[in-house]
Amino acid sequence: MLFDKLVQKRVAAFEQELLQKYYTEVENMYGKMRGWRHDYRHHIQAMKVHAARGELEEIKGYLDMLDEDLTSVETVVRTGNRAADAVLNSKLSLAGERQIRIKTYVRIPVQLTTPELDLCTIMGNLLDNAMEACMELPPERRLIRIYMEMKGNFLYFALTNTAGGAKKSSFRTTRGTGRGLGLGRVDAIVKKLGGHITRASEEEAFSTEVLLPQ
């Protein structure tokens, strides 16, 4: 009993630390975008001066510099929910570094009742597992699709990723982030929240659907 309580306390501390990390990362990305928008007018004015002087090479060089600068500003996903934004943008950044393409449709126009920590744990673990599976493939075949919206009184979260190997008949917990957190942890949280989770495996693809009551 004491050991179980210690494990639960460690898991809770880790998840809280992870949540704060997500928030910090997404705030940094927002800051980059705000800074770029602030400087945009100055960049336009500078190029107008070069254009008035007929300095085409200078304009070309300036545009190349702006293009390089813009690529450093991550694409920011805004779902309408702070916790979802934090996880998704953190994972999108990591996926980009790993040459994994991400396609998203995410929209949460209502206030969720799901605790932020639980939502981040579910999304973070599923995305970690999806990226882990993608890394078994060459870069051109790595793809994750994320779909997230309200369906009635339920938050619907669907995740599909490419994967190597044949169709699976069973789903095991993966190592994932957090020293053993993974599919089992996700299942436990979904059950605690009174939600539903389904998984499907096809040749070279794996999908998970989660419904959480709100």
Image (tube, helix red, strand yellow):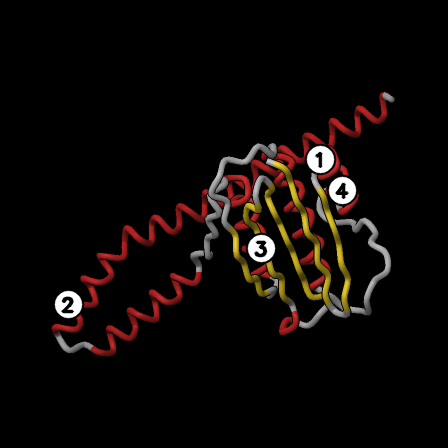
| 200 sits left or right of 26 in the view | right
4 or 3: tag closer to the N-terminus: 3
Q: Nearer the viewer, residue 211 or 52?
A: 211
Under mark 4, the amino acid is Asp
- What is the spatial separation of the Cα atoms under label 2 and label 3, in whole angstroms? 45 Å
Q: Quadrant of the C terminus?
A: top right
Judging by the rendered image, the residue that carries numbered circle 4 is: 187
4 or 1: tag closer to the N-terminus: 4
Q: Residue at the location (87% across, 22% down)?
A: 1
- x and y, in percent, of residue 122 in the image: 67, 43
- Which is closer to the viewer, label 2 or label 4? 4
Under mark 1, the amino acid is Gly
Judging by the rendered image, the residue that carries numbered circle 1 is: 194
Judging by the rendered image, the residue that carries numbered circle 3 is: 147
| 68 sits left or right of 176 in the view | left
- What is the spatial separation of the Cα atoms under label 4 and label 3, in whole angstroms? 19 Å
| 17 sits left or right of 50 in the view | right
Q: Residue at the location (21% across, 67% down)?
A: 47
- Which is closer to the viewer, label 2 or label 3? 3
Judging by the rendered image, the residue that carries numbered circle 2 is: 49
2 or 1: tag closer to the N-terminus: 2
2 or 4: tag closer to the N-terminus: 2
- x and y, in percent, of residue 204 in the image: 74, 69
Residue 136 found in image quarter:
bottom right
3 or 1: tag closer to the N-terminus: 3
| 110 sits left or right of 129 in the view | left
Q: Residue at the location (68% across, 72% down)?
A: 138
- What is the spatial separation of the Cα atoms under label 2 and label 4, in whole angstroms? 60 Å
Residue closest to the far front: 152
